[in-house]
Image: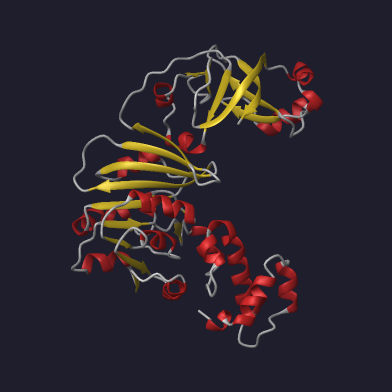
Amino acid sequence: MNTNLLQPNVQNYINKNLKVAITSLVLKGSPFPTISITELVEQIESKKRCEKKLPTWVSSSGIYFPNKLNIEQTSSEATAHYKAGLLKGNSIIDITGGYGVDCFAFSKTFKQVTHCELRTNLSDIVAYNYLQLKVKNVTCYRGDGVEYVLKSKQTYDWIYIDPSRRNTIKGKVFLLEDCLPNVPLHLEDLLVKSNHILIKNSPLLDITSCINQLKYVKKIHVVALQNEVKEVLISIEKNYADTICIHAVNIKKDNSQESFSFNYQQEYIYKLSEPLTYLYEPNSAILKSGGFNALCNAYTVFKLHKHSHLYTSGTSVDFPGRKFKVLEVLPYNKKKLAKHIPENKANITTRNFKENVVTIRKKTGIKEGGTMYLFFTTNKKEEQIVILCHKLL
């Protein structure tokens, strides 16, 4: 890390140029003899990416930012706080520490935190930033986290792993055995050092495949931030062999949580219905979790079709997702549909439908916008229908 970037005049330059086009800065070059324009641009780009993701880092003085790839891969403060709330104990080790956001959250709930990072430069940045953030209970280790924990004489209450999903040969990967470290390969050895392991995974991870790959899975948390799935967390407990609980959580803009839980092994009974007074669309965490039938047991709602993942009820229920008042249900007819749309504007969603949104707009001429919501879907009679709705708060 180039400590010259931390000088007050350089920090002022970075802050003043957060909204300036990068190309114009590159053309001007660096005004500082000990700092390259590449280093300045890296700080500016990374800090801009952190404005919403890591507000504590951005609002603190003297913070050093890594390259934008490290920022892209790190947890947000919101999801890190959620993870810290799941774990209890005195000691935790993060064997793939990265930019240290998760360890920062763990430092608020654990007495002793160990941050391991293979990349020396990134480890130095994290250790420096912890000093600026006044974090005193995190120990930073430069090197291979798996080797460190296995050679250590210490045992831990928790081991946390965020495997790298980039492979030098395959590029981005989403299978656990292709990530670094290879968790399935090291699992038994790691469980000698701790009875509890939490693994952070890509939103693209297949949950069933993951359960089949790993032993002792106790809980799975699907975490969405403002209705965008960010993480799939796998909680492992040594020798656990009981029911797997899946938690789908959507963290809203105001930091409140929309939660839904179900048992992975349980068969849930559901009933089908034509669209009734209210229509519901589950949040993205539930859609990722696969708890489609369990929703019907938890709430007094019906599915429109086995594969549509839209729900309906005659009376209003507090549903975890978007809620709509049904105005009309029409058979799909592109010529007649426009007559029912004020100003020919509507928000369109497709669920289990033969055409995508782009094709529908092209065929019908319906423009984006307005207060009307249209759901193009398939009903229980296998008919293609359009549900006209108004969104409810």
- 84 to the left or right of 380: left
Residue plotted at (25% across, 52% down):
196
Nearer to me, 333 or 135: 135
Whether residue 184 is visible to the viewer of this picture, yes or no, is no
Whether residue 372 is visible to the viewer of this picture, yes or no, is yes
Would you place residue 335 above or below residue 349 in this image? above
Q: Position of residue 381 (x, y in %)?
A: 54, 11
- 238 to the left or right of 164: left
Nearer to me, 291 or 202: 291
Nearer to me, 8 or 368: 8
Q: Position of residue 212 (x, y in %)?
A: 31, 40
Quarter occupied by residue 393: top right
Report the label total. Answer: 0
Residue plotted at (45% across, 49% down):
202
Q: Position of residue 364 (x, y in %)?
A: 76, 25
Residue plotted at (71% across, 74% down):
26
Specify the color scheme. Answer: secondary structure
Q: Position of residue 113 (x, y in %)?
A: 32, 65
Residue plotted at (35% across, 52% down):
199
Would you place residue 381 above or below residue 139 in this image? above
- 17 to the left or right of 256: right
- The furthest residue to the bottom: 33
Quarter occupied by residue 247: top left
